[in-house]
Image: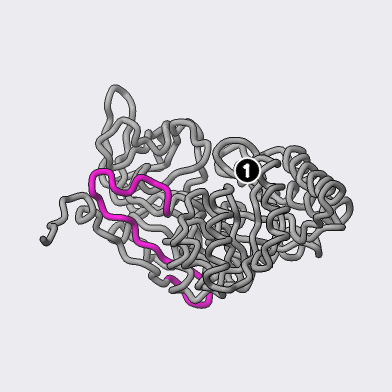
Amino acid sequence: MTEEIMKKTGEISAEKTPCYVFDLDVLNSRMELLGNVKASNSKICYAMKANPFLIEPMEAAVDYFEVCSPGELEICKEARIAPEKIVFSGVNKRKEEIAEAIRYGVGIVTLESLAQFQYVKECAGEFHRIVSIMPRLTGGGQFGMEKSELEQIIVESRNSPMLEVAGIHYFTGTQKKKSEKILEEARYLQEYCDDLQKRLGFIAPTLEFGTGMAVPYFEGDNFEDDLDAFIKLADFISSDGKKYQWTLEFGRYLTASCGYYFSSVVDTKKNHGIHYAIMDGGIHHINYFGQNMAMRVPKIIHLKKNEENRAGKVQEWCVCGSLCTFADVLVRKLAFSDLEQGDVLVFQNAGAYSVTEAIYLLLSRKMPGIYFYSEKSGLCMARDQVETWRLNKKTEIRR
């Protein structure tokens, strides 16, 4: 969605902000581009925690959805996502939650621990259903398992006719800006699976690799070409990694570029020589990974309420949100021309995580509305603004 398109629609005014707009044309172009570049022996898995609103527009473009909670599973059910496309993941999977996922028919259940392995074994036996499992190799921290436990699962699964090991899962973190690091981890996973074949006779059907590829967010980042790491990984998979089938797991790398966050200027003032713009949104709505206390500047479009009587005066502004905390600063210092009350600032590359991971309940303000945009359909509401004060009060308990 270009600035020209946003101005032509004229539909996102101060009366509708704060809100998110997800450009489905940008999303489709992104998915088509990655689909054309990826290795033939690889598939794409979308980590829906990045933006659950986009699972239906993305269903035809991805092979799997990573689902990390019972709530995300319910979202997939309501969206009628094919259960065989679901990889049920997450560190906190209770037996009853695993049972529900298996009843729904999810394609794969990842394993974060021996306890989860035991739960799946019990559920598979109770339901008399073959379950595909994928143990996760730890890269450090609380996620996954050490090799000894992972290998114990592989060995024990041979004696469980209701279990089949679908592969090995490996993911260590996000926003990796050096392609060498990503390739190093891909080689590590492959070499470990080569070793499993030698020692245990286990041939991994799939290597599920969370790449953690970085996306550009701030001034100074390279917005022209963020495909370099993806192309290098695709080359590795199609050459050195060609003996395996790979599933590449992405979140923000797929969706960040399609999102826009609209927020209106509700007040302006000058304190101790600093010009402040107060927005109707704030850090409870927009969150960029690595923003560093608002010192880094994301790409922002300034939409003026009107062009009349504007002097063309450029000033530096500190852009702040609506929360009663000194932390609510969106941009510490940025120059705008004739910024006034009623203008709208559009924060770009907001298609991943902000829509779900920001601190929405602070001050009991409304959650932003959500819109889809495409050239064919125009602007369509996906969710209206939501009152949060009802969630921040005592609930009457009926006895």
Q: Position of residue 343 (x, y in %)?
A: 34, 51
* 148 relative to 127 in the view: left or right: right
Q: What residue lies at 58% left-to-right and 61% top-to-bottom?
A: 121
Q: Describe the colour scheme in one phrase.
A: one colour
Label 1 belongs to which residue? 145
Of 235 and 376, the residue lying toward us: 235
- Residue 156 coordinates in the image, percent (x, y): 69, 55
Picture residue at 47% right of the left edge, 65% below the top: 73
- The secondary element bearing badge 1 is classed as loop
Image x and y of residue 15, in percent: 27, 60
Highlighted magenta segment, given as a residue range: 356-379
Q: Can you see residue 344?
A: yes
- 67 in the magenta segment: no
Query: What is the x, y in percent for residue 298?
Result: 51, 42
Q: Is residue 213 visible?
A: no
Nearer to me, 207 or 18: 207
In this orientation, which residue lies closer to the viewer: 164 or 215? 164
87 or 118, which lies in front?
A: 118
User: Looking at the image, which residue sits at the far front?
Assistant: 159
Residue type, mark 1 in image: Met
Q: Is residue 193 left or right of residue 12?
A: right
The image quarter containing residue 144 is top right
Up-down relation of residue 158 to residue 200 (above or below):
below
Membership of 360 in magenta stretch: yes
Tell how many labels: 1
Residue located 31% across and 55% down the image: 367
User: Relative to 379, is 86 on the left or the right?
Assistant: right
